[in-house]
Amino acid sequence: MTHARSRVVAFVFGRSLLLLAGAFTAVAWANVAPASYDEIAHPLHFWVNDIGMVFFFALAAKEVFEATLPGGPLASPRRAMSPLAAAAGGMLAPALIYVGLASVIGPAELTSGWAIPCATDIAFSAMIARLIFPATHPAIPFLLLLAIADDALGLVILAVFYPSGTLSFGALVGLMTAAVLLAMWLRRRHTQSFWPYVLGAGTLSWAALYLGGFHPALALVPIVPFMPHSARDLGVFDRREVHQTDTLNRFEHWWAKPVQLILLIFGFANAGVAFAEIGPGTYYVLAGLLIGKPLGIVIFAGLAGLAGGSLPPGLDRRDLFIVGVVAAIGFTVSLFFATAAFPEGPALAQTKMGALLSFVAAPLALMLARALRVRDARRVVAG
């Protein structure tokens, strides 16, 4: 019984189902009793969006950083060319479609949400990809790498284009310099516990971003690379990481489940949108994701091929198209970008609904994969 319970818990936590539960609860509550929902959800925004999500983005930054280590998929420019190009295309095309629709059809105020359809939810996209492709199919690691590159570019976009307040470069530079110097000092002293990095350097970094006018959820992103880490990358979400005892991996092991609880609260606090709020912003986000993602990924991966890059053996254009559709699940990061792009009001509600409804890419990808006989043509690479 205990073993069965453990398997259920692992299944729920491993697939970010708590985030879905929080989001669905919020949507249901907001449509049945919006006043009481707002009364409970609104006070949570600062605690979950500005503090709790620090650890979500830290775990994303860990995967990005490790991918640049020796043996990692971003360590070699030639290996990285195709997925990086695909990631860039999968962000540029959705942004252009979104901005084009908002500029031509309006209202113009929606254009500031151009980054919302650029996102890919790595957890849900990976889950759907595993339902479509065999376990050893190269489409899965390609999608994961694409999503990691997407996250990396997304962190830059969030920091540069979506300041959370009045910019103060003095506070930013002064406190961030202190944070980095402290992290360097901890690293030089071979500090093995991750807590001094989090509570010391991380707190200074959070204050630097918050007082500097940038989003403080990125506080641990510049600190993560200073934590003692493995010399090589084992691979994206490689199961052997469970047995790694370096500081960075212990940080991930400790925070993996708490982050799922944070995502539960994040989904509940941010996803409460009435269906009556569906409007132009909803359709622009969905058009950017469902059309722009697969289009940009396929086109830019092709351009990378002309420049000397190549797709992994066993991954053809048909697979790549399905990868593009799967990557159109924006969900978590799209929802976060919406809260960063707009204040409370119709624009925020509409684009939030677009982020939530992007999950329609999951059944769409499953149907297209069946129609294109993706699973029937298993060009599987062993190992």
Image (cartoon, rainbow, N blue to C red):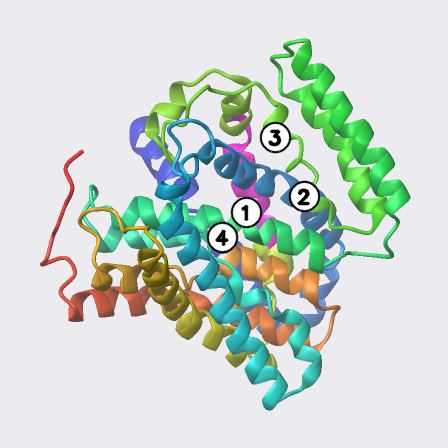
Q: x%, y% of residue 90?
A: 44, 62
Quadrant of residue 226 in the image?
top right
Q: Residue at x 39, y 18 (%)?
A: 243
Residue extent of the magenta highlight: 254-266
Q: Which residue is mark 4?
A: 150
> Mark 2 or mark 3, which is nearer the start of the sequence?
2
Q: Which residue is mark 1?
A: 152
Asked if the residues shown at circle 4 and circle 1 are in contact, with their CB atoms under 8 angstroms apart, the answer is yes
Q: Which residue is mark 3?
A: 224
Kind of residue sitting beneath label 1: Ala
Q: Residue at x 31, y 57 (%)?
A: 305
The reply to whether the magenta stretch includes residue 278 is: no
Kind of residue sitting beneath label 2: Leu
- The residue lying furthest to the bottom in this view is 105
In front: label 4 or label 2? 4
Q: Quick one: label 3, few (<14), some, or many (20+) residues within 10 Å?
A: many
Asked if the residues shown at circle 4 and circle 3 are in contact, with their CB atoms under 8 angstroms apart, the answer is no
100 lies above or below 71 = below
